[in-house]
Image (cartoon, rainbow, N blue to C red):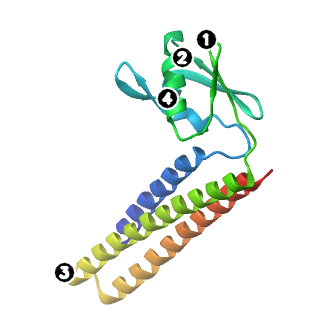
Amino acid sequence: MIKDILKETETRMQSAITNLEEDLTGIRTGRANPALVERLPVDYFGVPTPLIQLATISVPEPRSLLIRPFDPTTVKTIEKAILASDLGLTPGNDGKSIRLNLPPLTEERRRDLVKLVNGRLEDARIAIRNIRRDQHADIRDFEHEKMISKDDLERGEEELQKVTDRFIETIRKIGQTKEQEIMEV
């Protein structure tokens, strides 16, 4: 029973890490990255659709993105979505494609982005701790219902804490890497 709980804990915590990584790809660094706009919602015939489903996104130069819509009639709609987003980028439209030039980040903007990353990291740590709390309650319930012994309870709690510590450390490393990417000039 304890092994099942630990396996479930690992799965849930890994999905929290995956969500964090996906979330952080949308935060701008010094280089152009298609992930910056891939999940940008575009109103496509009244349905919010991720940009990646409507266009190919390439990086022709280190500081620019080229967006080529599959349907040329969506160029204006995509352009509006980019302007409405919090990316702070102005799209260049040639009628068939959209070019996004990423200006170099100022020191102040870099610090703001690091604060944003730290907020997302804290959200991930909270998610990990909530998973631990839920699983810990399950282990205690098993002991309370006499399904496991007191020793099993203590071993389970120790293992649960080790798993939690490992994932918290993973979050710290992800945060360090992202912060270095942002602060790189």
Amino acid found under the numbered disc labelled 4: Ala
**Left or right placement of residue 144 versus residue 104 in this view:** left
Amino acid found under the numbered disc labelled 2: Val
At mark 3, the secondary structure is loop
**In 3D space, how far apart are the residues under numbered discs 4 and 2 (Cα atoms)?**
10 Å
At mark 2, the secondary structure is helix
Q: Residue at x 52, y 48 (%)?
A: 23
* CB-based contact (under 8 Å), mark 4 and mark 3: no
* CB-based contact (under 8 Å), mark 4 and mark 1: no
Residue bearing the label numbered 3: 145
Q: How many marks?
A: 4
Q: Residue at x 54, y 31 (%)?
A: 83
**In 3D space, how far apart are the residues under numbered discs 3 and 1 (Cα atoms)?**
66 Å
| Residue sitting nearer the eye, 63 or 130 | 63
User: Which label number is shown at residue 75?
Assistant: 2
- Label 4: how many Cα within 10 Å (few below 14, some 14–19, many 20+): some
The percent coordinates of residue 162 (x first, y second) are 51, 76
Earlier in the chain: of badge 4 and badge 1, it is 4
Earlier in the chain: of badge 3 and badge 2, it is 2
User: Which label number is shown at residue 96?
Assistant: 1
* CB-based contact (under 8 Å), mark 2 and mark 1: yes
Q: Nearer the observer, disc 3 or disc 1?
A: 1
Q: As displayed, is residue 165 above or below residue 120? A: below
Earlier in the chain: of badge 2 and badge 1, it is 2
Earlier in the chain: of badge 4 and badge 3, it is 4
